[in-house]
Image (spheres, rainbow, N blue to C red):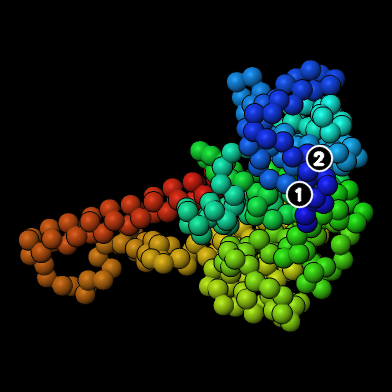
Amino acid sequence: MMMNHSLKNRCKVAPGTVIAGKWHSNKYTVLKELGYGANGIVYLAKFKNSQVALKMSDNGMSITSEVNVLRSFAKVQGSTLGPSLLDVDDWNSNRGQISFYVMEYIQGPDLLSFIQTKGKAWTTVLILQLLNDLNKLHENGWVFGDLKPENLIVTGPTPKIRCIDVGGTTLQGRAIKEFTEFYDRGYWGLGSRKADPSYDLFAVAMIMINTAYPKRFNKSTGGITQLREAISKQKDLLLVEKVIVKALHGQYSNALQMRSDLLSLVTDNKSISPGNKSTTINSTNSTFHNPKANQPPNQAKSRQTYRKKKKKNRWVETISITIFIAFLYFLYIFQKLL
């Protein structure tokens, strides 16, 4: 949703502009514009020797609302979904008083850019992280609202999903304040715009679809029929179709249910992944217990044949154990990333 031109013009400042807080006297030097939405403009700014994100708006109520959201985030133990709040103040500009707040500058590519660069295998890992954080947000009475890849940044070095815009975050039970049509269940005719956890989970399902269709697609027939048809054309989406469709239908009451189903599907898919590592491990177990199981009974073997068989069995054991250890290591890394 776009902000009106008069608001954008009032909040528009050039790089090098110094924003001086009226109450706290902190000074921020604007470096560049990072983006704008319905209620203000976000700038990259310098404060002392660090970079921060500064959002300004002449809508004081909007600023207050977003600040309250960030303060609420700070109270959610263990959650890093949104940026840390650093300062709230007013600036007496030559266009009048403008409210602003300063938050942590979260650096990194957006979700789709990260996946396109690093590979689609990261999609599930990051979605699992997102669902975990959303659950904590929902437990504290909020719904994110305008959930979309542009608002999700992946930081490093260990990839972690973070959000950079809380403008659409809404108290549960109220009407969603901001939304983007592609991720909005009302747009697709699959639910209301009442703020509840299932609204966000619908958006998560659409983000998963978006990873397979980076340029998105327009609504034609709309509804679940068009979305299921889109899923059916992408192998990556078919693997998690069950979870996506349940979220599109609003059948998850909380994010942990969706996370649990997704994790179960991923675990099952790993066991039948190309190479069939688990099958290889199981098929070689007989070798560990009875190396001579495949030998015909009473077969006469020379000393040389026996040594060759023994050497071969040791080789098979070594390969099998190596595969098994590699498989366990993969699972360990996968869980660690969650």
Identify which residue is drawn at 39% across, 50% down.
Answer: 325
Identify which residue is drawn at 75% across, 37% down.
Answer: 55
**Dot 2: few (<14), some (14–19), or many (≥20) neighbours within 10 Å?**
some
State the SS at label 2: helix
Report the front residue among 51 and 331: 51
Identify which residue is drawn at 92% across, 54% down.
Answer: 174
Q: Which residue is mark 2?
A: 10
Residue 49 coordinates in the image, percent (x, y)? 60, 20
Report the front residue among 231 and 177: 177
Disc 1 versus disc 2: nearer the observer? 2
Residue 8 coordinates in the image, percent (x, y)? 78, 45
Q: Which residue is mark 1?
A: 37
**What amino acid does circle 1 point to?**
Gly
**What amino acid does circle 2 point to?**
Arg
Residue 87 coordinates in the image, percent (x, y)? 77, 26
Mark sitting earlier along the chain (1/2): 2
**Dot 1: few (<14), some (14–19), or many (≥20) neighbours within 10 Å?**
some
Identify which residue is drawn at 18% across, 72% down.
Answer: 298
Quadrant of the image occupied by residue 64: top right
Question: Compared with residue 28, is residue 66 higher up or lower down, i.e. above or below?
Answer: below
State the SS at label 1: strand
**From this viewpoint, is residue 147 visible?**
yes
Question: Compared with residue 231, is residue 267 higher up or lower down, i.e. above or below?
Answer: above
Question: Compared with residue 45, is residue 226 higher up or lower down, i.e. above or below?
Answer: below
Q: Quadrant of the N terminus?
A: bottom right
